[in-house]
Image: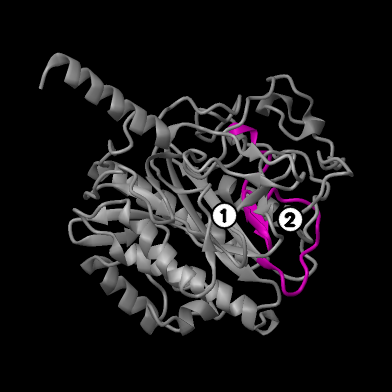
């Protein structure tokens, strides 16, 4: 190969990497204020959308104050949405409480003060960090705490409870365990968890709207403990199984089953890009669609890094799986159109047609003989009806490795409490 050929080859590699890792805003279709459609050649890096940093001295009443400028006022912050904004569905923005305080004694991620993550992922998407034994143990601890907090928050998903109250519980439980709630001030996100209701695909901001019977709610919890993140999410039905109609059950069951199928695929030597086809094939055969604008991600001491996990059929060069890789799979599955509308808060993404969306997420560790859910359930975790009735995997799923399967058999032999 000549020097010129080598240079061209290198340029093509860099272009390929940038096409996966770069940020790209949505294209606005001027035919309608609602017609937001993502640029199909790019995606928001991993799951969380990049935003411009806000000034460090911004007023606390805007909901994005730095830790040194947090207001003790309990005055509610009105939604930053114009009355003329055309919502896609029934969910509306409600006032929020001010951002919650984190003591200086707790180890905080590099974005905690100014909202700007300092660590960047490797340039090439197939370069993936392999964790050491010591790092894996810290990841296990962070994963266990994330699950503990998620279970605690899930018990509060009841009619009349606000997502702001759930956020308070998440925040206080995380702090009480000497950890930092990872979403807080990540690219200026104002709260300690994400609460996505009905047509909200992801990144819903907790507010003062009371939950209503029949709502479906995704609680997305991430904690930063001893320098490492643990990330997980789960669906809940307000009112429990009795409040879920057939359409709700079909959406939740399909989302859960495609997620389990994708996780069962994971083992050393497999291509990350193959995950998406497993998800897409399962959901489209049942009349659903999969979101292409947000994805799963590598995780560790950095909140979002390589690999990018696309939840649809693709041929992106995301690398091969190897022991020591830690990442998330978190498909977002929709009843109708998988395109999205971004609210003016620059976080809340809802379906374009106002139909509902569902999502599940684990932080996963690839082992020598399979995969393990670092955010797997405990004996005290609720057993959801989609776990009980799944035709893909009966009971709680903890992984495919020999060790995970042994714990899973013991756990499923234990009488788990039912949700609702």
Give coordinates of residue 259: x percent, y percent.
43, 65
Q: Is residue 189 magenta?
A: yes
Q: What is the x, y in percent for residue 121?
A: 38, 31
Which residue carries the number 2 mark? 165
Of badges 2 and 1, the one in the foreground is 1
Magenta extent: 187-216
The residue at which mark 1 appears reads as 220
**Which residue in the rendered view is the most extreme toward the top?**
3
**68 over 360 or under it: above or below:** above
Looking at the image, residue 367 lies above or below residue 96: below
Mark 2 to mark 1: distance in Å? 15 Å
Name the residue: 40% across, 30% down. Answer: 18
Q: Mark 2 Cα within 10 Å, few/some/many (few <14, many 20+)?
A: some
Question: Is residue 287 at all visible to an observer of this figure?
Answer: yes
**Is 220 part of what is drawn in magenta?**
no
The quarter of the rendered structure image containing the N terminus is top left
The disc label shown at residue 16, or none: none
């Amino acid at each position: 190969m000549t020097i010129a050929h080598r240079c061209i080859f290198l340029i093509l590699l860099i272009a390929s990497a940038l096409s996966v890792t770069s940020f790209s805003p949505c294209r606005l279709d001027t035919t309608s204020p609602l017609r937001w459609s993502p640029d199909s050649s790019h995606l928001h890096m991993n799951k969380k959308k990049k935003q411009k940093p806000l000034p460090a001295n911004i007023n606390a009443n805007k909901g994005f104050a730095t830790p040194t400028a947090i207001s003790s006022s309990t005055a509610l912050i009105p939604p930053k949405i114009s009355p003329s904004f055309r919502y896609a569905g029934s969910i509306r923005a409600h006032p929020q409480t001010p951002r919650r305080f984190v003591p200086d004694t707790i180890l905080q991620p590099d974005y905690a003060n100014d909202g700007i993550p300092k660590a960047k992922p490797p340039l090439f998407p197939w370069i993936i960090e392999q964790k050491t034994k010591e790092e894996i143990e810290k990841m296990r601890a962070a994963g266990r705490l994330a699950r503990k907090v998620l279970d605690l928050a899930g018990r509060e998903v009841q009619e009349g409870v606000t997502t702001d109250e759930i956020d308070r519980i998440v925040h206080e439980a995380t702090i009480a365990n000497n950890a930092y709630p990872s979403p807080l001030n990540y690219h200026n996100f104002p709260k300690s968890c994400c609460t996505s209701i009905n047509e909200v695909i992801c990144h819903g901001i907790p507010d003062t709207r009371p939950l209503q019977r029949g709502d479906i709610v995704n609680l997305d919890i991430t904690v930063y403990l001893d320098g490492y993140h643990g990330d997980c999410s789960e669906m809940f039905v307000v009112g429990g199984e009795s409040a879920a109609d057939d359409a709700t059950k079909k959406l939740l069951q399909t989302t859960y089953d495609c997620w389990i199928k994708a996780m069962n695929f994971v083992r050393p030597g497999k291509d990350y890009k193959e995950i998406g086809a497993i998800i897409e094939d399962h959901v489209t055969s049942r009349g659903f669609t999969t979101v292409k604008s947000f994805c799963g991600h590598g995780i560790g001491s950095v909140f979002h890094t390589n690999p990018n996990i696309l939840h649809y059929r693709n041929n992106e060069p995301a690398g091969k799986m190897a022991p020591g890789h830690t990442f998330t799979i978190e498909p977002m599955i929709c009843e109708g159109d998988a395109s999205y509308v971004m609210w003016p808060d620059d976080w809340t993404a809802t379906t374009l047609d106002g139909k509902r969306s569902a999502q599940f997420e684990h932080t996963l560790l690839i082992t020598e003989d399979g995969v393990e859910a670092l955010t797997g359930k405990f004996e005290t975790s609720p057993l959801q009806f989609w776990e009980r009735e799944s035709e893909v995997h009966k009971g709680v799923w903890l992984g495919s490795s020999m060790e995970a399967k042994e714990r899973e058999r013991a756990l499923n032999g234990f009488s788990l409490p039912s949700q609702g």
